[in-house]
Image: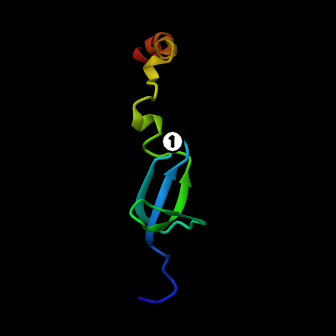
Amino acid sequence: MKKGIHPNYREVCFQDLSNGFKFVTRSCVSAKEKITLEDGRELPLYKLDTSSESHPFYTGTQKSVDNMGGRVERFRNRFGKTAAK
């Protein structure tokens, strides 16, 4: 392999800012901050706005399209009959 052309692939700690959830994975992302984990490892820290721990789709708090106050049902009543013809 040629030297100097590959990104720095290493372990990085990602932290969800909305709830403080942290996870470690390997990544090439550049991070300016560092964090010391409970096991003593010092890793680069990359802060996220949303992760699987806080995203409504993965937590089950996302609203379904069918629960939008009858808007879908009104649309089906209005335009569903013309599409069937």
Residue at 44% from the left image edge and 14% from the top image edge: 80
Residue drawn at x 51%, y 42% is 19
Observer-nearest of 69 and 53: 53
| 2 is higher (above) or lower (below) than 39 | below
| Label 1: which secondary element | loop
Residue displayed at 43% across by 68% down: 41
Q: Quadrant of residue 18?
A: top right
Q: Based on the displayed image, in which of its 4 quarters is residue 33 positioned?
A: bottom right
Q: Which residue is mark 1?
A: 19
Residue 3 percent location from the top left of the image: 48, 89
The amino acid at mark 1 is Asn
Quadrant where the N terminus is found in the figure: bottom left
- Image height of 31 relative to 63, above or below: below
Query: Residue placed farthest to the right in the image?
Result: 32
Quadrant occupied by the C terminus = top left
Q: Residue at x 46, y 34 (%)?
A: 56
